[in-house]
Every structure is written in structure tokens, then in C-alpha cells.
Image (tube, rainbow, N blue to C red):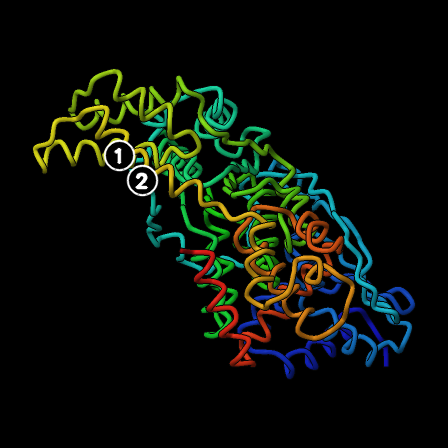
Amino acid sequence: MNVTAESVWDNCLLFIKDNIQPQAYKTWFEPIKSVKLTDNALSIQVPSKFFYEWLEEHYVKLLKVALTKELGENAKLVYVIRMENTYGNKKPFTESIPSSNRANMQPQELDVPVKHKNPELKNPFVIPGIRNIKIESQLNPNYSFDNFLEGDSNRLARSAGMAVANKPGGTSFNPLLVFGGVGLGKTHLAHAIGVEIKDKYPEKTVLYISAEKFTQQFIESVKKNTRNDFIHFYQLIDVLIIDDVQFFSGKSGTQDVFFHIFNHLHQNGKQVILTSDKAPVDMQDIEQRLLSRFKWGLSAELQNPDFETRISILKNRLYRDGVEMPEEIVECVARNIKTNVRELEGAIISLIAQSSFNKKEVTIELANQIVDKFVKNTKREVSIDYIQKVISDYFQMDVETLQSKTRKRHIVQARQLAMFFAKKYTKASLASIGSQIGKRDHATVLHACKTVDNLAETDKQFRKYIEDLNKKFVQ
């Protein structure tokens, strides 16, 4: 019997079809064509780099078993990536790359350059008719560039945001990652970019979503076996805005699916905008390949606003609310609340409320009372030293014992709890937490946090320790 590339691949498909869901087979295997057979190497043609990556990530073992049955232990698989060139040249662009489907099955990270980028590449995964679905942007029109006031603390991020809004997907700021502390305007800026794009390019599909909601949608799609539909949907977005991307930390499945969605959008000239409470270099438990994608574009930091910017923010808020307030009151609030725009506006709103609802005159004394409440709340940041002291007292030991090398169970647990709460309540890196709690490394801290999570689920007494200590830190 004459063995051809076609006959070998047809036999492989029969085996594969028996081992996966019909929808998965239809989506990921029907579009593949066999190209040639050379000795024990079968070449197959796939429609895109994304397609190749997906096969290698999810079906590598199945492909190996199927191919080994047909061609023996030394079987090899070579992908030919085909992309139609829409510029009149009928000859397809092809790039052959070997599969990681060898005897040792060591996966390789291969980046295949897409040499013919164009917006009309056919996407084999798009469900017919899905383009007709109207996708709501989830943007808040109240967050605009008009009320995102510029200052030294945010000039780079705001300017980059404006550039992206003017030419989404057409600047080197892709992805644009905006990072900074709580209440500095990350979400506001992300919405403002989206609102501006919708205004300038109404035909573009823009979607704002929190990383938490994205993760929930993904988990739901896995439960309902609609993961491919989930991916198809996100491939249709022209401008994807994901808020609080640090939430992906430790969630390997979500990171994996976002990696492929990101690659697809980026290769097709779509814009990705991300926000985070920390810079990529400080993100923990995020895969390296994803972090490298975050660094492809621009990472712009939002810093604490300076005094002049704080004054402008307050005056802008008063103007929008149609309220007049003495200059000395505005300066009093701006001078005392330095770290958080949200609290800055909160304080002035409280003053307006006191003035209008309680018929109180806005005085310096009243301003100081309001400011005190906000400043007290912001000063309660818990330090690693304080955490160690509280936990040592709770377990009736001194801090030196907690930090010591001893392996006694109750001391080890106290030390692990200290690391757990330091990660939860401080912004310190894992390495910094480890060095301050007995000169441990970041891996020890990571292990401690996982151990605490596990014990919290299985040990009632240990769960009580966590609850008791938690109350001490949030009082």
C-alpha cells in the first residue's frame, strides 16, 4: 500500500476524532491540510501562528500518539504556517517549523515572525455571523480626558493615552500598561482612552473589562465547555482594555488563554490597554512569557500628584459641582491629603455635603476635621515589623524566636503567618518580605503563603488563628 502524506494524516484524524469533543475537532483539526511526507516527517499546513501555538499548547500529546501509531517512534511533525497575501500575490507565505513532538517531547518556545501583517487575514475561528453581534463597550462616559487633569505626576501616561486614542493599534505603545498606587486614576485614564476612541472611531469594537471579570468568564466557559467561543469573542475586539491585570497572578489557566488572545490581537494590529497596581518587574506569579508581552509597548507610571495638581483637581471638582469655596480651604485639603486623588475628591465632597445638608459654614476648623478622618485612614498602612510584633505577641513568643531557624511546628506556622499577612497587607516584594522575616528567600515566602491557604481550608484551629489576626490588622 502506497503511504502518502494524505493517508497518514487521514489515519491520524480518525484517531484524534475518537479522542476529543466534536466541536474541538471541527475547530482545530478540520482546517489542517497535509502537505508532504519525507521519511518519518509529516508536514501539515495550518492557517496562522496562533493556530500553531494552540495545537502545541493543548494537543501536543494527542498528536504525538496519533503520529507514532502511523510512523513509529521516530515520527516528526512539521508545521507550515500559511497566510493568504491579499496584495495580489497568489503565492502563500509559508514558514516551516518543527513540532516539539519528538521522543523527548520537550516543548520549545518558538516565535515565528508574521511577515505579511494585514488586517484582512482570514481567521479560521470566527463563528459565522458573530460579527453582527453588538458588543457593549462597558465604558463610563464620565471618565474623560477633559476631567483627567494633567500634571508632572501623570504627564507621560496621559500623553501616551492620547496618542493611543488618536491612533489605536498604530503606535509603538501597544500594549499600553498604566500602573500606580490606589486612587491615582488608572481606571479613569483607561476609560478615557476608550471613550475617546469610540468618539473618533465609532466603527471600532472597544471593550473595557476588569481582570477579575475576565477570569470569571473564562472559568465559566471551561465549566460549560465553551472555551473556544470565549476565545472567538475576544478575537473580535479592536481595543481591549483590561483593568487590574495583576489579578491574573497565580491563575495559570487565565494567563494561558490571555496569552493567546493577546498574541492574536497584537499580530492583527489591534490595541491592548492594561492597568496594574505595580510595574511588570514587580508582578509576582505571572508567567515570564506574559510579562515579556507586557513590556513590548510602554509602561507608564501614575505617581502621587504634586501640590499644584492637587489644587487643580479640587478646583475642577468644585467647578463641576457649581460650588464656590475659599482658597484657604482648598489649600488646606490639598496640603494634607497627598497620596490619593480619590480621597482628595472624597474630602472635598464631604465638605460640600456638610455645607449643603447640615447648613454648616465651611471653615478651616471643619476642613481640618474632615481631613483628619481621611488622613487617619491613609496612615494605617501596616508594616512588616508591626505584623511580626502582633503575631509574636499572639503566639506568646518574641520576634527573634519567630525569625529563628528552628523547625518547631508552632514557630514555623507563626513565621508562615507573618509572611502571609506581609504579602496581604504590604506592598513589599516577596524577596523583601523574606529578607525581613529571618533572611529567607522569595520561594520560602511563596511556599508559606500556599501552606497558609491550604491549612485555612483543612484545619479549623488554624483558620481561627487567621481570623483573630486579621481583626488586629484591619481595626
Badge 1 amino acid? Gln
Residue 373: give its label. 2
Q: In terms of secondary structure, where does tag 1 sit?
A: helix
In which quadrant of the rendered image does the N terminus lie?
bottom right
Residue 159: give its label. none
* Place of residue 257 in the rendered image (x, y in percent of width and height, measured from the top left): 58, 59
Answer above or below: position of 329 versus 111: above
Give the side of residue 116 with respect to residue 139, left or right: right
Residue density around tag 2, few if under 14, some if 14–19, many if 20 or more, within 10 Å: few
Residue 5: name its quadrant. bottom right
Q: Which residue lies furthest to the left in this view?
A: 359
Judge by depth and name the residue closer to the eye, 72 or 229: 229
* Place of residue 420 in the rendered image (x, y in percent of width and height, measured from the top left): 59, 61
> What residue do we see at 21% from left, 22% from top?
319
> What residue do we see at 57% from left, 36% from top?
174
Badge 2 amino acid? Lys
Give the side of residue 94 with respect to residue 132, left or right: right
Number of numbered tags placed on the structure image: 2
Answer above or below: position of 472 versus 91: below
Answer yes or no: do the residues labelled 2 and 1 have beta carbons within 8 Å?
yes
Answer above or below: position of 227 versus 365: below
Residue 52: name its quadrant. bottom right
In which quadrant of the rendered image does the C terminus lie?
bottom left
Q: Residue furthest bottom?
A: 18
The residue identified by callout 1 is 369
Q: Distance between the residues labelled 2 and 1?
A: 7 Å
> What residue do we see at 60% from left, 69% from top?
452
> What residue do we see at 34% from left, 47% from top?
138
